[in-house]
Amino acid sequence: MAWQGKSIATYSGGSGQMAVMGELLHRKCNAAVPHVDVGTDVFAFRDDREDVARIQVKTAVGKGYKKGKGYNAKFGIPMHQLERTDDPPLFYALAVRLDKGWGSFIVVSRAKLQKLWNDGLGSENKKSGDLELHMQFRPQADKRRDESDREKPENERVWEARCGKFDLTDSVDAWESLPPLKGPVAIALDETGPEA
């Protein structure tokens, strides 16, 4: 039954898209799905700002480690999409589904992913035409971290994310990197101007 394989992937991808939309809405950011998907799964915007983020969602099932805490997941990013000029900018939201809920989300711009790929991130799968990212998620080793974090379920902990030698921890749940969620830019006033 070939349809079952495609059906499972469709449902998994759809659930990841809904989870990303839920995260956006939780942050008071509106989310819309285009009628025709040609590389953008979700538009993120706020009514009080003109910024819009185009988001491509990729979903993977996380597999827990037998030894130690953490999990890994494999994502496929279409090479033809990654190689395009980043105009308008595109963001990827990589959603990890765990047994009991959602794990970490990697939120990263196409521009950053292009740079990392040029530096050797991931591996190209010639058969699928995807850049494959084998992500590893482990609890952060920072000893200054709140002790209560160790008692939290896996989907609520602070995670370190790596793909081979590349550290992507700064992209874990980096929703504020999306243009509609970025804070206002502070303007420095020149206080040495002419006196009144």
Image: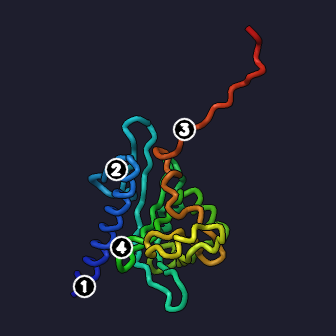
Q: Residue 140: percent from the left, percent from the top?
A: 60, 72
Asked if the residues shown at circle 1 and circle 2 are in contact, with their CB atoms under 8 angstroms apart, the answer is: no
From the viewer's perspective, is the residue at label 4 or at label 2 nearer?
4
Q: Which of the two residues, 52 or 49, is positioned nearer the viewer here?
A: 49
From the viewer's perspective, is the residue at label 1 or at label 3 nearer?
3
**Applied colour scheme:** rainbow
Q: Which of the two residues, 189 or 4, is positioned nearer the viewer here?
A: 189
State the CA–CA distance, disc 1 to disc 3: 50 Å
Residue ID for mark 3: 184
State the CA–CA distance, disc 4 to disc 2: 21 Å
Q: Quadrant of residue 118?
A: bottom right
Q: Earlier in the sequence, mark 1 or mark 4?
A: 1
What residue is shown at x 35% (from left), y 51% (from top)? 25
For label 3, the SS is loop
Q: Residue 133: percent from the left, percent from the top?
A: 53, 75
What residue is shown at x 51% (from left), y 48% (from top)? 87
Question: Outermost residue, top direction?
Answer: 196
For label 2, the SS is strand
Residue ID for mark 1: 2
Residue ID for mark 4: 101
